[in-house]
Structures are given as structure tokens and as C-alpha cells.
Amino acid sequence: MARPRGRAPIPALTGVRVALAAWIVCHHLIRWLCEGNPLVASDFGILRQGQAATSGFFILGGIGLYWAYGEKLVHDATLEGWGRYLRRRWAAVAPLGLLGAIIAIPYELMAKIMTGAELWAAFVANALLVQSWLPVGGGEHGVSLRFDGPTWTLSSLLLAYAVFPVVALLLHRRWRSRASVIALGVVPWLVVLGAAIAFRDQPLAVWLMHVCPIVRLADVLVGVAIGCWIVRWGRPSARAGWVLQPLAVVAVLWSAHVATFGEHGREFYFGSWYIPPMALLAISLTARGGPLVRLFAWSKLERPGRVAFAMLMLHVPFISLGWELGIVRPDRLWAVAALLAGCLTVSWLVHLKVERPLVRRIGGNGASRAARPG
């Protein structure tokens, strides 16, 4: 069997990361603007539904995994080949996870939410990217939101990276039909949806449905199924893109609206609630044309799409420390804008001078950016 060749990235899947990252930044910023002020988070509408974008990043990560590695891992189905893949995937996330935990130290020390041995145990857990497995300490999310909250996504993705070679092998040897690929995306979502309904009122529901790596694996498998589909049977046509992309926008906005203003508490649905609309959006962006493809495939968005990953991982320490210092306040929006501009500058420098060099050094020249999570 000939060795599979690398594929060119799908530009729209990179460009859309800018919009998704901006949504998550707004989500976190609103939380801090409302902290200790008369503002109500629901007044900001769907901007407070950043967890939709989180689901989108997991799905994009799954598409990238199969697009970049699916056939390669089947071709080289050895412990050495899989070990090389795992080293590359770890190298793509571990440096930013550690850096995010380090720069979050000042706020954690000032906030005093955790102290003593508990504080530094949480730091070690976050620095090692095992925090999403720990439903204890630091509130309803466990320690996952301490020491740079967004890096919990990296912690959860490590499980997906470990499982993916087996999934890719099964897709190659067993799950060859269209029905099998569809089931790979749909069945895990149905299981998570059932768990969300059954456990939504339990004390650990927020951690379970929003953070737990086993549950968030469903988002990634949806992406893997989409990636496998477009590799085997081709990407949607440009005509299909013009139909699917407006539908996807409506579906995403509607689901966010219901989560914000609906009568039922959607806070415990998280991934299960947003998987279908975000999956539709991801599928539509793999099309060969369409309004969103024209927008997000714009060459000017490629570099911001790469930097968006670092911005996503580093913005919370800046915002939380800014709140502690009295900068992040509703009556100081100019200062908030300056803070975010500074964070963006630091993120760009980290991407250029820290993230990329370390990825190359640790992961080798083949450390692909295509499967990078958001």
C-alpha cells in the first residue's frame, strides 16, 4: 500500500477559528464585566453562549485529526508510528498548557480561591494537562477552570488523541459503509444527550457535561466522522455550500437563543445541545464554495486563524487579572480594549516565538498544525 500523501488544509476551517475564538473571548469577558456589578449576563444575549464555540473547536479538531492523520496511522499501524503521532499531538498542546498555567499564577495568588497545598496541587494538575479529569476543588467545574480555564480543552483532547488511532483503524477495517461513519458521529452524541438529561440536576453535572474528557469525546468523534466522510466520498459541492451554510448559521443562532432565553435550564446540556448545529456548520465549511467559505477562506484570515489558538488559551489570565486590578469594569471599556489588544499582541508573539518553535523541537518537522484544536 502506497504511503498516503499529506493534504492541503481547508482554508475556511482555519478562518472560522477567528470567529469562534472571538465568541469565547466575549463569553469570558462578559462574565467578568458582570462580576460585582449590576449587569446581568443574559442581557448580552447569545454572546454569553461561548460553549457553542467550544463544541465547534472540538469538532474542528476531529476533522483535522482524520484529515491529517487518518490514513497515515492506518498505513503505519505500529507502536512506533502511533507513538510518533502521540508525541506530535502532545507537542501541539502541552507548551501552551504549561505557559497558560504559569501566567495565571498572579491572579490565583491574589484571588485566594484556593490556598496552600490545594493551590499548588491544582497548578501541577493544570500544568500537566490532567485537570479535566478532576471534579474536585475550585467550584462546580472542579479544578479545570483554575490556572487558565480554557486549557481544560487541551486536557480533554489528550484522550481523543490517544483514542483516535484505534478509531482510524476501525474505520479502515470495519466501519467502511456510509451508515457506519454516520453512526460514529450520531451514537456518541445520543449517549451524551441521554446523560445530559439524566444527570442535569446532579451536583457534578456541570463538570460532567462540560469538561469530562469521556463526554467531550463525542464532539471530537463527530468531527472524525465528518473528516472520514469528506476523505472517502468527497467534500460537498459549491452549490451545496450555498444551501448548507445559511442553514448552519440559523441553526447555531437559534440554539444559542434557546439556551439563553428558553424556559428550560440549558446550562447542563453544553456539548450535547450544541453538537448538531456546530456539526452542520463544520460540514458546510468543508464545501467547495458558498458565502461562508468565501468569507473564512479569505487569505487575510489565515494567520489570525493560527494565532487564535494562542489567544484562546491565554486570554483568561489577562482578563481575570485585569478584573482583580480594577481594569475590567463596565465603565472602563477603553481599558478593557487596551487589555485585549495587549493580550492579542502577546498571543501573536507566543505563537511566533514560543509555540511554533517548541512544536517543531518536541514534535519534529511532521508536527502538523492541521489537527490543532481551538
Image (spheres, grey):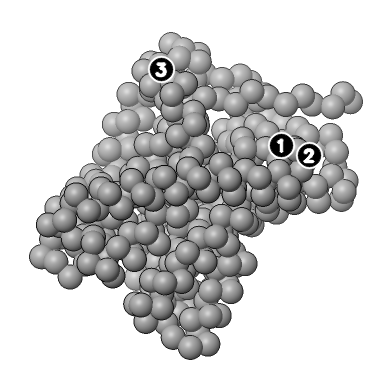
Is residue 52 shown to the viewer in this render?
no
**Mark in the foreground, 1 or 3:** 3
**Mark in the foreground, 2 or 3:** 3
Quarter the N terminus occupies: top right
Return the residue at label 1: 69
Return the residue at label 2: 73
Q: Which picture quadrant has residue 99?
A: bottom right
Q: Nearer the viewer, residue 187 or 150?
A: 150
| Element under disc 3 | helix
Q: Cα distance, mark 2 to mark 3? A: 32 Å
Q: Name the kind of residue labelled 2 in the image.
A: Leu
Is 20 left, or right, of 327 in this rendering? Answer: right
Q: Name the kind of residue labelled 1 in the image.
A: Tyr
Q: Cα distance, mark 1 to mark 2? A: 6 Å
- The x, y position of residue 274, in whole percent, is 39, 46
Callout 1 touching callout 2 (CB < 8 Å): yes
Q: Cα distance, mark 1 to mark 3? A: 26 Å
Q: Name the kind of residue labelled 3 in the image.
A: Arg
The residue that appears at 51% across and 37% down in the rendered structure is 306
The residue that appears at 44% across and 86% down in the rendered structure is 115
- The x, y position of residue 27, in whole percent, is 30, 52
The residue that appears at 27% across and 49% down in the rendered structure is 338
